[in-house]
Image: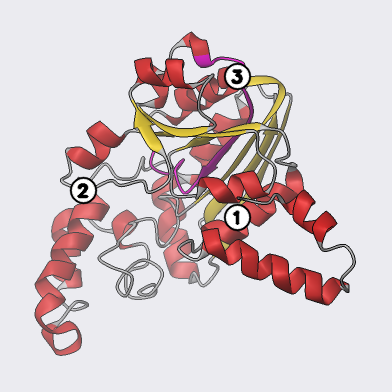
Amino acid sequence: MIFTEENLNKLLSFLPLSFKENIINKYQKRFTKNLTYHIDVLKDFRKDINFKDKIILEVGGGNIPKDYMFFYGAKKYICLDNITEWYTKNGWNYKSDDKKIFSINDSIKAFNKENSFIIDARLEDLPEFFYDKFDIVISIATFEHILNLKESIDIIYELLNNSGNLLSSFAPIYSSMIGHHFWYNNKYNFNTIVDELKFIHLLYSYDEAKEIIKNIFIYDKYGDLYLDLQKSFLYLAYESNVLNKLMYNDYITIFNDTKFKKLDLIPTWILNNISNDILSELENRYGKMRYDVAGFYVRATK
């Protein structure tokens, strides 16, 4: 049996606040122990919009345990992820321990029968059956990957019912110093190797970057991984379509051109250790914009 936050608070109402909070926190860990950055983002989402009795769609996900969403009162929690095309074609194994995975046709049938499942499809392939069906659309660390973002935002608008809400947090964006999106593993990535790699993807060509990173990823520092790290950086920064390569100003333009009656686009993850020389070079090449912004938080109402 999964308690909701509301029911658990009522059940423990006789306890002092500190004891009650401790019990609730321990209870939550049953379904949050494998989540990392999602937890803080979801807390921000819940501060903005109450999940209680809401039909929620997560775009680009499925990692959040359904028990988490139901603990906070969600009526339905449905996920959309392009599993067949994105994961399978890249040789990645996709597994969901708590949700069934349905094709588009099967998901239409499941909508009235299941309270949580994953739709294996692209956003643009969703039929009009799903229009006006959702109270909330959430998305975490996804919008920076969507190649046709303007069209996708328009579709999300249609999926929401009247006065429905979009909540999204995403990073890193391409125009930031970590916009190369280098990720080899949890130890070597854009979070852990910042200064050495900052803005290489914007300031240098592939061939120039290839020579530069030979002096960054060296055997003496990284051992047998040094060549793999070099290849990984070059692939993600210059060859892969893992990022949409939209700049700060592109996001401003896209979100200002939506149909949402109310929209807040809030810059997050500010990385302001940019020298005047580098800033001047960036502005000469790409124009004036906030190169210190690595991400955005989006809050929008239909």
**Residue position for label 1:** 41
Name the residue rendered at 47%, 26% in the picture: 152
Q: In the rendering, which numbered label is found on residue 92?
A: 2
| Secondary element at image label 1 | helix
| Secondary element at image label 2 | loop
Mark 3 or 1, which is nearer the eye?
A: 3
Q: Residue 61 location in percent, x, y?
A: 43, 42
The three-letter amino acid code for the residue at tag 3 is Lys
Is there CB contact under 8 Å for labels 1 and 2?
no
Answer with mark 2 or mark 3, whichever residue precedes in sequence.
2
The three-letter amino acid code for the residue at tag 2 is Trp
Q: In the rendering, which numbered label is found on residue 150?
A: none
Q: Is residue 226 left or right of residue 243?
A: left
Residue found at the very far front of the displayed protein: 1
The one nearer the camera, 268 or 95, is 95
- Residue range in magenta is 130-146
Q: Residue 104 location in percent, x, y?
A: 37, 19
Q: Is residue 32 left or right of residue 132?
A: left
Q: Is residue 203 left or right of residue 172?
A: left
Label 2 crowd (10 A; few <14 / some 14-19 / many >=20):
few
Q: Residue 283 location in percent, x, y?
A: 46, 53
Label 3 crowd (10 A; few <14 / some 14-19 / many >=20):
some
Residue 79 visible in the picture:
no
